[in-house]
């Protein structure tokens, strides 16, 4: 094990020539980033989870961090998240008449529920035929029950509003904090200062706090993807979170934190506006939502396709090489930054394509591609037989009860008036 660790932490990979890990050990005179500091981000990352059920589930997964979780900061953080949801976000949502009820629930059926929870949420044709014979229902009614049951697990508009308010609050706070911190630093105005004195740049307490909070939040986004309703863009978002967490971790360990703070603050700017647009959409303030999304699109494209390559990539690809020469960790760092830029291009393409398509068809209010006009998790499956309110027995006027269920105890009609969409 010691040999593996020695190989992984090889100084010739991580550090410039003639620099060792011993040179970057914290002393009374100066503190430097230490890899073990990053463990501090895990407990807050679990507690950052916005959904109360997810928060309870995360608590049960925190047994590996008992000492950290017992710290007052983390206890207060958990209380702050719950308080924001219960005493601020929810009353605001209800005051703005955000819809509180979720999708219509499927009527109880022990046999179908057992199949749904223990076997599959998407029964194939063979299983549908078997259930049809067992329950004496037609296949269409069973399909409808499964659609309703799947939608039952999706969050209500109220839940999504509270989630967006929590994220909006976080992004606004951390973006404001980042701007206030960076405006006092020389590298905001001259990116060459990011490399002045590298790697012997002392770690400032404000910078350490900024990094740990950002990393904990992105860990929470990673965790929530696995305990939340799976979205259609799960793969691309998971890739983004992996790259972001790796970049934050990598830049902290190698003390590339100055350029890291610039990158973090730049990315937070657009997210503030996006979450505000979502909240406006959930409140059915369509004009405000459109205006905010237009603002988001402009900020996103300018910051990710303009400022990011000209400011961040320029200094890491060229100015850094001029100042320090080359060592392997820099190649990895720049590859990750370029992958992030590829994701920026992909999302910008979606935004521009959706906007052009909607404007050309005169539907300016329906051009929000990133979960604004239509949050992927709120996609509601619908069927063409919405008018039916009870499952049809294969035998006309049948009153036969099968395994405790009957035709009258089946499913209600499937959300009349909901839009047809593909389930993810």
Image (spheres, rainbow, N blue to C red):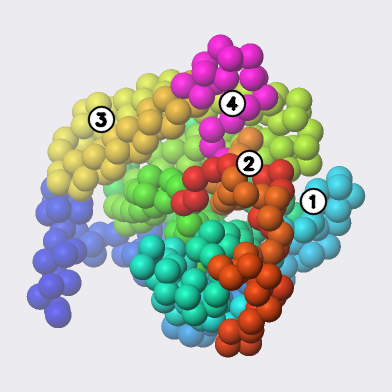
Specify the farthest residue to the right.
95
Q: Identify the residue at image location x=34%, y=65%.
A: 35
Residue on which the image places disc 1: 99
Please provide the residue range marked out in magenta.
353-371
Which circle's residue, 1 or 2, is located before the other in the chain?
A: 1
Residue on which the image places disc 2: 419
Q: Is residue 361 magenta?
A: yes
Q: Position of residue 207 (x, y in %)?
A: 50, 51
- Decide which of 363, 251 is in the foreground and name it: 363
Apparent side of residue 221 relative to residue 316 in the rendered image (left or right): right
Specify the farthest residue to the top.
360
Which circle's residue, 4 or 3, is located before the other in the chain?
A: 3
Marker disc for residue 40:
none
- Decide which of 221, 225 is in the foreground and name it: 225
Alpha carbon separation for disc pair 4 and 2 = 16 Å
Alpha carbon separation for disc pair 3 and 1 = 49 Å
Q: Does dot 1 land on a helix, a strand or a loop? A: loop
Between label 4 and label 2, give the one nearer the viewer: 2
Alpha carbon separation for disc pair 4 and 1 = 22 Å
Q: Identify the residue at image location x=52%, y=16%.
A: 356
Q: Position of residue 115 (x, y in %)?
A: 47, 77
């Amino acid at each position: 094990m010691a040999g593996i660790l020695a190989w992984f932490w090889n100084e010739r990979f991580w550090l410039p020539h003639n620099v060792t890990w011993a040179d970057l050990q914290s002393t009374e005179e100066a503190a430097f980033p230490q890899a073990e500091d990053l463990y501090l981000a895990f407990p807050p990352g679990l507690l950052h989870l916005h959904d109360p059920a997810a928060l309870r589930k995360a608590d049960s997964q925190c047994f590996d961090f008992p000492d950290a979780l017992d710290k007052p900061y983390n206890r207060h953080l958990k209380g702050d998240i719950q308080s924001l949801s219960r005493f601020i976000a929810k009353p605001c949502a209800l005051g703005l008449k955000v819809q509180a009820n979720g999708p219509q629930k499927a009527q109880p059926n022990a046999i179908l529920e057992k199949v749904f929870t223990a076997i599959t949420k998407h029964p194939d044709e063979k299983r549908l035929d078997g259930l049809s014979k067992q329950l004496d229902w037609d296949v269409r009614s069973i399909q409808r029950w499964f659609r309703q049951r799947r939608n039952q697990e999706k969050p209500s508009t109220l839940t999504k509003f509270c989630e967006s308010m929590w994220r909006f609050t976080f992004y606004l706070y951390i973006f404001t904090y980042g701007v206030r911190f960076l405006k006092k630093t020389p590298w905001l105005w001259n990116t060459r200062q990011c490399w002045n004195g590298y790697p012997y740049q002392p770690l400032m307490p404000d910078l350490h706090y900024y990094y740990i909070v950002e990393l904990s939040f992105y860990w929470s986004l990673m965790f929530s993807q696995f305990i939340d309703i799976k979205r259609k863009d799960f793969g691309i978002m998971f890739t983004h979170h992996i790259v972001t967490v790796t970049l934050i971790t990598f830049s902290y360990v190698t003390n590339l934190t100055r350029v890291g703070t610039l990158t973090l603050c730049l990315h937070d700017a657009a997210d503030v506006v996006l979450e505000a647009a979502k909240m406006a959409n959930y409140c059915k303030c369509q004009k405000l939502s459109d205006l905010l999304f237009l603002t988001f699109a402009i900020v996103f494209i300018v910051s990710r396709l303009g400022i990011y390559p000209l400011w961040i990539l320029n200094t890491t690809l060229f100015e850094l090489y001029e100042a320090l020469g080359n060592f392997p960790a820099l190649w990895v760092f720049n590859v990750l930054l370029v992958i992030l830029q590829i994701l920026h291009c992909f999302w910008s393409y979606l935004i521009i394509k959706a906007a052009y398509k909607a404007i050309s068809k005169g539907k300016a209010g329906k051009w929000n591609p990133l979960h604004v006009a239509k949050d992927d998790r709120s996609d509601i499956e619908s069927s063409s037989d919405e008018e039916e309110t009870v499952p049809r027995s294969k035998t006309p006027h049948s009153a036969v009860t099968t395994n405790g269920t009957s035709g009258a105890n089946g499913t209600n009609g499937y959300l009349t008036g909901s839009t047809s969409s593909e389930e993810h």
